[in-house]
């Protein structure tokens, strides 16, 4: 509720995520099950039908990875993806072969 202390005081579990983004709003449908701690008698609940709420949904631990420009394609060597990277060694710029893993996004 708007008058509760803390930014996100109630925990819940996401039980549905739609597989498409609404192109007109840029939103994704997500459903969560959240306890209604003051629930019981009508009018004492934290949330009722028609209320809106704000949620924070963690997507996992942050990972160290470099974004890549979509114009710079990966190479493929017997199924292993790779990039050529320009690095400085001994004051010279050289090109190195770097095997890489492909992740989401």
Image (cartoon, helix red, strand yellow):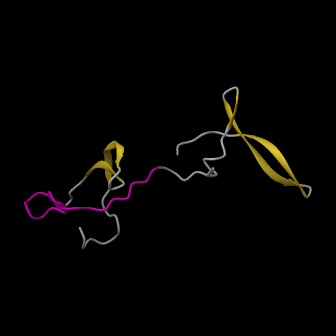
Magenta residues, as a range? 38-59
Query: Relative to the observer, which residue lies in front, 39 or 82?
Result: 82
Left of 52 or right of it: where is 27? right
Find residue 28 and report its horizontal and vertical position in percent: 34, 50
Q: How many marks?
A: 0
Find residue 87 and report its horizontal and vertical position in percent: 81, 52
Is 85 included in the stretch rendered in magenta? no
Left of 13 or right of it: where is 37? left
Q: Is residue 56 above or below residue 80?
A: below
Q: Is residue 103 above or below residue 10?
A: above
Location of the N terminus (image quadrant): bottom left
Query: Relative to the observer, which residue lies in front, 83 or 49?
Result: 83
Residue 5's quadrant in the figure? bottom left
Is 57 included in the stretch rendered in magenta? yes
- Residue under the image location 24 percent in, 54 percent down: 35
- Residue under the image location 33 percent in, 56 percent down: 25
Residue at the outermost top position: 78
Find residue 23 and report its horizontal and vertical position in percent: 35, 50
Residue at the outermost right position: 90
Residue at the outermost left position: 42
Residue 101's quadrant in the figure? top right
Left of 33 or right of it: where is 73? right
Report the predominant secondary structure element of the magenta stretch.
loop
- Residue under the image location 38 percent in, 58 percent down: 56
Find residue 52 and report its horizontal and vertical position in percent: 23, 61
């Amino acid at each position: 509720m708007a008058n509760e202390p803390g930014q996100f005081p109630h925990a819940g579990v996401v039980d549905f995520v739609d597989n498409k983004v609404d192109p007109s709003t840029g939103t994704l449908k997500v459903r969560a099950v959240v306890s209604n701690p003051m629930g019981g008698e009508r009018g004492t609940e934290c949330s009722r039908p028609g209320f809106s709420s704000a949620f924070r949904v963690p997507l996992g631990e942050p990972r160290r990875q470099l974004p890549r420009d979509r114009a710079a394609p990966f190479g493929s060597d017997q199924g292993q993806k790779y990039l050529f990277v320009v690095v400085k060694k001994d004051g010279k710029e050289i090109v190195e072969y770097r095997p890489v893993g492909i992740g989401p996004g």
